[in-house]
Amino acid sequence: MRPNERVVLAAVLLAAAAPALAGEWRAEGQADEPAPERAGGLGGPSLIRPPRQDDGTSGLQSSFRLWTASGGTRLRASSPYAAGAALAGVDGEANRIEGVLRLAWRGAVAEGSVRTTTDAGGETQAQAIPTELYQELDLLGQHLTFGQKVTGWDVAYGFRPLDVVQQERRLALRPFALVGIPQVAWEWFDERWAVLVLWANPLRGRALLPQHDESGAARVFRRLGPVDLHAVARFSDRTGLQAGAGAAAVVGEALELHGSARWQARDEHLAPPRRAPDGSPMAARPPGPPEVRRDQVAGVVGFTLTPGLDLSILGEAWFDPAGDAPSTWRQRRRLAEDQRALGDAGAAPAAAVAGNLAWGLSAFDRQDLLPWNLLLHVSRRWDRLEPALDLLVTPQDRGWAMTASAGYQGERFRFDGGLRILGGPPGAAHRLYPGWATFYVAAQLSL
Amino acid sequence: MSRTIARFDVPLILALLLVPATGSAAGEDVHALLTRADGYRLASAAAQVTTRVQVWKGGAVDKERVYLVHVKPGRRSLVISRSAVEKGQKVLMVGDDFWIVLPSSQRPIRITPAQKLLGDAATGDVATLTWAEDYTGTVAGEAVIDGVPCLRLELTAARRGVTYARITLLLARSDDHPVAADLYVASDRIAKRATFEMGELEGRPGVVAMRLHDEIQTGRETVIEYLSREPKDISDEYFNPMVLTRHAPE
């Protein structure tokens, strides 16, 4: 059996078992109040006790979700990167399947994902990973968490400067379930304050990806009437200190305003395009290590408006220092055009040109291509159907990405479909990308 | 089929209209009336209520949701979805402030009062079980609904953030239990007509179901059934939105 067949079989078996797994198990006659646990033979109630479940019982809670999405990307032949698109995988995935099973019992949560990705050539990669696995405990009025837990912070939607621990990539199409961050966390809260201190990725040191770095982080929350205030800090070897603050407030019946900003001592930035010492556009090695920039600031402001008629409008503007300036994109474009010209003239092997262009395409593998971004999201619900339109604009080069989508929510099934188109004037970063349109259809079963 | 305020017993109404408006009914203390009416929906100030919401369309159940609702004085409530389609979703209401935690995001999101109205059974319909704290008004007359003599109260929101800006509420003259209500949104447009079904829950008489006839999307009816209702005083800290990404109330 091929690996993809094994994973599909595992997903089908999970789906078959899910009706029995999903729901709640309670032993016959089990009392609502769990019996006090004994601590180390002291004979009294334990000081450490796991929290109970959502409904106040100690029963096992479970849920299961199986989804599949198929789609494709239409290539833009005029892009200077077009010859590297296949090597970089821009022509896309043909299919994704994911089954997610979640179990929760007395403060212990286990969630696992079986996921496959099939590319346009039919090649399938499969993974089975724990996405969350943690235990929550209450101890003398303090609250502790041990294990791997999704830990998303911030008040914004399109870009989240305060999401310093999870570092979730936003605005992705068809994302898999988030994978939690291993941590030891302490929390204290009352009705208005919440304080969280955590040690993320303990003893891991510096990892390949920033979110996997060992770090210490803290978050303070204060509710002041209609305003939520957030402050966060994180320290890691890669970034040094990061510190930020944000607020969200409701103004009137239908308007919510939010904003957040973060400073960090060091930030790794994708290296600018470089030519060989002799001026040749061709390189024999991948782009060099990232540049380290100091005192980087990121920020976002936005609103949500719900004027009625089941209409929802979101607007945001943000500055992300991870994006490149338009002048850097002009350099990238010239380099890619020169590489393509060498290939077209037969002056360089096609494989070498494709390899160089594919390396160049790594510049597109990040959330924001340019620092300044504007996002408008409009959606309206008609009973079970919810169409939505997203427009992301990079005003510095007038590039844009537009996504039209629609979702149908049934009782157990959900169906989604969408189309994302990238455009802008010639030279705009979104226009340079060799895939100009990506479409998808998806189906999801929840039990 | 829902009963609505429009279905009056005409002769009795005419007779009642002849009663001088300065009668005993007009002199009733509206707050006391609402407090007694609230007692039929929420017997204790702090409680845990299991609620089933069914949306009927074309004579068949179109959607069904189950919620666990924790209510505390001070206009505090926490709604936890138990249905597969919304499992893990929590909505917190503290006074005029509202948050939602979606299972996919793991962070509380501030929502506007208008967003409470989204959905077939507005979150406010599920989470709000009292009127006395939220509304003031007058006794505007009397009426008979399906043979039940009622007091007609005209209520207006005493604070922002309530689900409905205005309510015409009919309480049974005999014991002040709620019989019917017209629910108006901020534009003064009628959104829903409600009728209340009495029964016995946890050994005492109370409202066991509320039927909401949608006046905007006609042909739809939402039935909110109270499956269980028990006194339960969860800790105040669970009304902090940041706690919702952690475990739910003990």
Image (cartoon, helix red, strand yellow):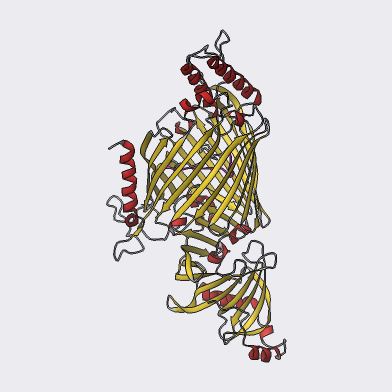
Question: Residue B250, position in %: x, y?
Answer: 43, 58
Q: In this view, does A132 lie above or below A311?
A: above
In the picture, the quarter occupied by the N terminus of chain A is: top left
Q: In front here: A43 or A316?
A: A316
Q: Does the magenta stretch include residue A253?
A: no
Image-based side of A196 in relation to B13, left or right: left
Q: Which residue is drawn at 47% across and 69% down?
A: B60
Residue A11: horizontal and vertical position, in percent? 34, 46
At x 50%, y 51%, the residue is: B102
Pick out the residue farthest to the front: A345
User: Is B166 situated above or below A265?
Assistant: below
For the image, the number of numbered tags is 0
Q: In this image, A349 relative to A307: left or right? A: left
Query: Does A423 appear above or below B110?
Result: above
Specify whether residue B32 is in view.
no
Location of residue A340 by image quarter: top right
Q: Looking at the image, which is closer to me, B120 or B102?
A: B120
Q: Is the magenta stretch mostly helix, strand or loop?
A: loop
**Res. B167 visible in picture:** yes
- Among the 4 quarters of the image, the one containing residue A295: top right
What residue span does the magenta drawing correspond to?
A149-161
Name the residue nearer the viewer: B9 or A97: A97
Position in image of residue A328 (x %, y %): 62, 22
The C terminus of chain A lies in which quarter of the figure?
Answer: bottom left
Left or right: residue A81 versus residue B168 is left
Q: Is residue A156 magenta?
A: yes
Residue A233 appears at what percent x and percent y?
Answer: 54, 36
- Front residue of B244 and A69: A69
Asked if residue A418 lies left or right of residue B164, the reply is left
Q: Which residue lies furthest to the top in this view?
A: A278
Considering only vertical position in the picture, is B57 above or below A342?
Answer: below
